[in-house]
Amino acid sequence: MFSDKRMRSPNRLEELFPARALEEEVDRRYARVRARTVQLAAPLSEEDNCVQSMPDASPVKWHLAHTTWFFETFILKRHESGFRPFHRDFEALFNSYYNGIGEQYPRPQRGLLTRPGLADVHAYRRNVDQRVHELLEKRGDDAELRALIVLGAHHEQQHQELILTDIKHLLSLNPLRPAYHAVQAGAAGPATEMKWMAFDGGIVEIGHGGNGFCFDNELPRHKQYLHPYQLASRLITNGEYLEFIDAGGYQTPGLWLSEGWDWVRAQRLSAPLYWRRDDGWSEFTLGGVVPLSPGLPATHISYFEADAYARWQHARLPTEVEWERAAVACKLQGNFADDNLFHPQRAGGRGLQQIFGDAWEWTQSSYAPYPGFRSAAGAIGEYNGKFMVNQYVLRGGSCATPRDHLRVTYRNFFPTSARWQFSGIRLARDN
């Protein structure tokens, strides 16, 4: 994330966002990311864009506006000569959680914002896009400006993933079970055999240490001690999770954390989100309702469910240190949002499989600051640091994550009951 001289060193900006490390020019990256967001929203009706299915989700129209608000608030307002807002009320309407900016419209009520209309939001996007490009033409050599635009592009890619997961939750509540797109969820067939991969213990370094972009929660790079351990070679499949259900996993309190057991009973849960049992098991996907494929990764699993399944298998969830130590030797390739499948695929190959893409992997690590972590000064410092409580870390990205948004050091985080994200299970055990 953006930082300044008051953080760790006078060269902080250059360390985080060096121009030589960018894959493309900032203006081209900006245009590409902004166009992709509009593309993801294109299959939706105007009504689809406006509805909010639950307090944790947001309307697609709000995502389109908020990502634009980010550039207007943190870039244009800060750097544009003679700045004037597109609309004076948008600063509060589309402010997510930045108390340093000011008032925010209540998150659970975003679905009530029938105005501004979708056409007005797209006009807002076009206006801000033009002004950002003009600003780059005038001040493209400004390191701070470039850093903020790169940050804003990665912020927007986070919201691209949320657009997919939020609209999936919304469409799943419609009795018609409509499809977002026509691509099938995945080919049937068994996954590769799950094997245990052994890793040595010792002192390892984790955290971002390269020249490219990272968020502040990936810093600073530091040492950790590991005991020898093993990781499962792939994600847990639907078929394997179904065995847990058939064995009474949701009715066995000894498998669950106390809070998780209370949650399961209060919610009357008996299967992952989007699973249905009629004549046979089926699953709602962004491609519509499909028969549950035993060989595909089990997704939309909460931390509570992942932990209970691991206990049932006499295993555990990995720590984020164990995950990063193993993943650092893997190529950053897999099934990402760029593939436009928007659903996990079967494991294939040798060694560690599905380490990137397909489904975010729960770890047993609490989302906490790394030793020496400091938030940036000002409102931009609210991006990550203030959420470091009552959440757990997930690693690896998913089928809804843009490929060039991810890194081996990327730390995602959600509360223990979250299920609407593409989250799955990789087992670990002591060596």
Image (spheres, rainbow, N blue to C red):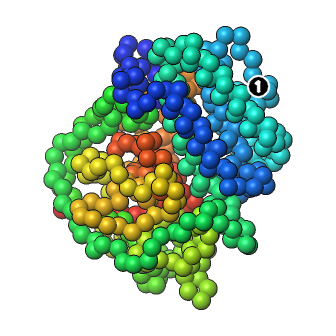
> Does residue 15 sit above or below 290 in this rendering?
above
> Does residue 370 sit above or below 414 in this rendering?
above
Residue found at x 71% / y 49%: 59
Residue 264: give x, y in percent of width and height.
Answer: 56, 70
Q: Amino acid at mark 1?
A: Phe
Residue 152: give x, y in percent of width and height.
Answer: 55, 31
> Does residue 394 sit above or below 101 in this rendering?
below
Counting every numbered tag in the picture gives: 1
Asked whether residue 266 is in view, the answer is no
Q: Is residue 29 left or right of residue 431?
A: right
Residue found at x 62% / y 28%: 71
Residue found at x 43% / y 84%: 247
Can you say which quadrant of the picture contains the C terminus? bottom left
Residue found at x 40% / y 22%: 19
Nearer to us in this view, 123 or 391: 123
Residue, far right? 115
Nearer to us in this view, 114 or 310: 114
Asked whether residue 235 is in view, the answer is yes
| Rendering quarter of residue 279 | bottom right
Q: Which residue was labeled with disc 1?
A: 86
| Rendering quarter of residue 11 | top left
Residue, far bottom? 279
Q: For numbered disc 1, what is the local secondary structure? A: loop
Residue 403: give x, y in percent of width and height.
Answer: 43, 47
